[in-house]
């Protein structure tokens, strides 16, 4: 009977072995390095420019990758054992210039030779995100983008709660959460990131606990403060994508203006009882919030959830659609809702879509406003802290008012 | 006949109706017809001097009438005019 060490000795006698420095010399001269380890090992770090075929698939796949049997190949694994067998297999397949890397990538690393920084996923992450990794549009590269992404949730309420849960589950690496509120019993009918035993606790801390319990990959940055003129620019600058889950017009305009100035996308949703509105604002690619709504309605005509009530699932559905938009933006896939407003009617069970256009006279995002910013000048926009005092139809610059019956002749 | 689609926030002033059908040649006439039938909507949609509030958007078959012909935009039979006010709940 042949022992495994006997077999290894026999195989080793049939192959050529080279040292890591020699392999590095060949690599820089253009020789192919072939990594025969398992996918998880490859993802945890590999030699630059190497190609990857797990040992178990070598016979099946190598011909398609390297059809020329004269191609010089350096084969490596972790310690040089699996790659010794791999080298022998390549010899059997007719490859004539095969060398095994003695000591494998472990010996290579000990000499400080270059390893591609692990952009891949750990074994635990491969298990956690396996259903993402199976989708070609996400895959390891997409999941790595999600893990590198910084998403700011403005508000940990009706919209922010479901979005926080699913973005955390999806492995968005950093979630910023700004909210100044504490958890109240009346929040729990829809704000699913919070729990009954956290009534009275800060919403930011409650959300952090839920997210950290759900997915330890996610770094949570909490901001226990109100979004205001003094912090909005700092927060917007620190994140890649912003999810607007606020509940006042004042903060929606404030966020819009800072995001346009910083060139950051805002995924917007708002809800009223059984209805929701959703769109994605990408500065200058499509309209901004001021293009859509040049001025807010007076508060008595646009009561929030605390006054008008809301069916709990409506912010749930809209918040998840926001999370969907965030994922698309981070992954660079699909058709974000830029210039499109999605309307959800829970009672009718319908979604409708409206087309939105950039307002050429928008005080925040017109070409003129953009040029002003490009000159380094600030644009001071009207704020709507006290919308009631403005009256409904106050002319505030911007889009031509929809007056009388006269045709406006705007851009088609 | 054109159909005006009303959002929830305005239905309380329209006897709960989700849509109202009116005879109109333009968007402006359709709004006039709507507020004639449901006077409670007048203050919600129009200023004291009869102009449309700037926080109310109108879409004709999914297109913002600001970029069509405003209130003068012609409407035909089977056209849908959607009233869309800003909402802030979150």
Image: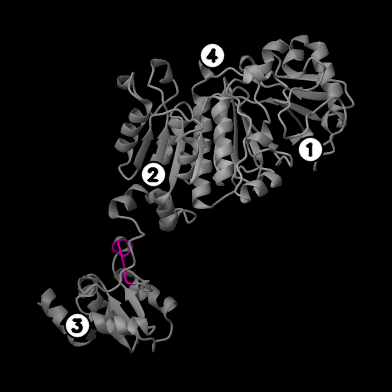
Of marks 2 and 4, which one's residue comes earlier in the chain? 2
Q: Quadrant of the C terminus of chain A?
A: top right
Which residue position holds label 1? B67
Query: Which chain letter matches label 1?
Result: B
Tell me if mark 1 has few (under 14), some (14-19) or many (20+) residues whose alpha carbon lies within 10 angstroms of its own.
some
Disc 2 and disc 3 on one polypeptide chain: yes
Relative height, residue A189 to residue A381 (above, below): above
Q: Residue at x 67, y 27 (%)?
A: A295
Q: Residues within 10 Å of mark 4 (few under 14, many from 20)?
A: few
Q: Quadrant of residue A140?
A: bottom left
User: Which residue corresponds to mark 3?
Assistant: A11
Quadrant of the image occupied by residue A20? bottom left
Relative placement, left or right, of A402 versus A120 is right
Q: Which residue is mark 4?
A: A307
Q: Earlier in the sequence, mark 2 or mark 3?
A: 3
Q: Is residue B18 magenta?
A: no
Asked if the residue under mark 1 is in contact with the one under mark 3, i.e. CB atoms within 8 Å, the reply is no
Q: Is residue A394 above or below residue A173?
A: above
Asked whether residue B1 is in view, the answer is no
For marks 3 and 4, the one nearer the N-term is 3
Magenta span contains residue A45: yes
């Amino acid at each position: 009977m042949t022992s495994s060490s006997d077999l290894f000795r026999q195989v080793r006698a049939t192959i050529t072995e080279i040292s890591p420095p020699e392999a590095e010399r060949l690599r820089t001269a253009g020789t192919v390095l072939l990594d025969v380890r398992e996918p998880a090992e490859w993802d945890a770090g590999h030699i630059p420019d190497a190609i990857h075929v797990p040992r178990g698939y070598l016979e099946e796949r190598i011909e398609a990758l390297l059809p020329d049997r004269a191609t010089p190949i350096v084969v490596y694994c972790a310690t040089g054992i699996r790659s010794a067998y791999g080298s022998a297999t390549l010899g059997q397949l007719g490859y004539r210039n095969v060398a095994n890397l003695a000591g494998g990538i472990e010996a290579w690393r000990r000499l400080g030779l270059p390893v591609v920084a692990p952009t891949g996923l750990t074994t635990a992450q491969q298990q956690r995100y396996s259903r993402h990794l199976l989708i070609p549009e996400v895959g390891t590269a997409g999941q790595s983008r999600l893990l590198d992404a910084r998403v700011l949730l403005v508000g940990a309420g009706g919209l922010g709660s479901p979005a926080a849960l699913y973005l955390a589950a999806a492995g968005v690496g950093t979630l910023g959460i700004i909210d100044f509120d504490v958890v109240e019993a009346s929040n729990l009918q829809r704000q699913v990131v919070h729990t009954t035993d956290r009534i009275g606790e800060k919403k930011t801390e409650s959300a952090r606990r839920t997210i950290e319990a759900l997915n330890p990959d996610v770094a949570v940055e909490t901001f226990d403060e109100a979004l205001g003129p003094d912090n909005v620019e700092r927060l917007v600058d620190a994140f890649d994508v912003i999810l607007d889950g606020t509940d006042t017009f004042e903060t929606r305009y404030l966020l819009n203006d800072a995001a346009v100035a910083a060139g950051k996308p805002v995924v917007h949703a708002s809800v009223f009882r059984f209805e929701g509105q959703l769109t994605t604002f990408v500065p200058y690619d499509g309209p901004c919030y001021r293009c859509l709504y040049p001025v807010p309605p007076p508060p008595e005509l646009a009561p929030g959830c605390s006054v008008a009530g809301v069916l709990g699932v409506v912010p749930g559905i809209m918040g998840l659609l926001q999370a969907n938009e965030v994922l698309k933006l981070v992954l660079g896939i699909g058709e974000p809702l830029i210039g499109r407003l999605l309307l959800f009617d829970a009672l009718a069970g319908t979604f409708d879509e409206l087309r939105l256009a950039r307002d050429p006279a928008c005080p925040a995002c017109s070409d003129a406003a953009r040029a002003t910013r490009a000159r380094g000048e600030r644009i001071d926009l009207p704020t709507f802290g006290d919308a009631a005092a403005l009256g409904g139809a106050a002319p505030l610059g911007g889009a031509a008012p929809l007056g009388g019956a006269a045709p406006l002749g705007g851009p088609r | 006949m054109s159909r005006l689609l009303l959002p929830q926030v305005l239905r309380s002033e329209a006897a709960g109706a989700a849509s109202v059908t009116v005879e109109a040649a333009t968007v402006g006439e359709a709004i006039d017809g709507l507020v004639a039938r449901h006077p409670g909507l007048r203050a919600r949609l129009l200023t004291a001097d009869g102009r449309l509030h700037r926080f109310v958007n109108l879409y004709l078959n999914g297109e913002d009438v600001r970029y069509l012909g405003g209130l003068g935009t012609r409407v035909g039979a089977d056209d849908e005019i959607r009233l869309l006010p800003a909402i802030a709940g979150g």
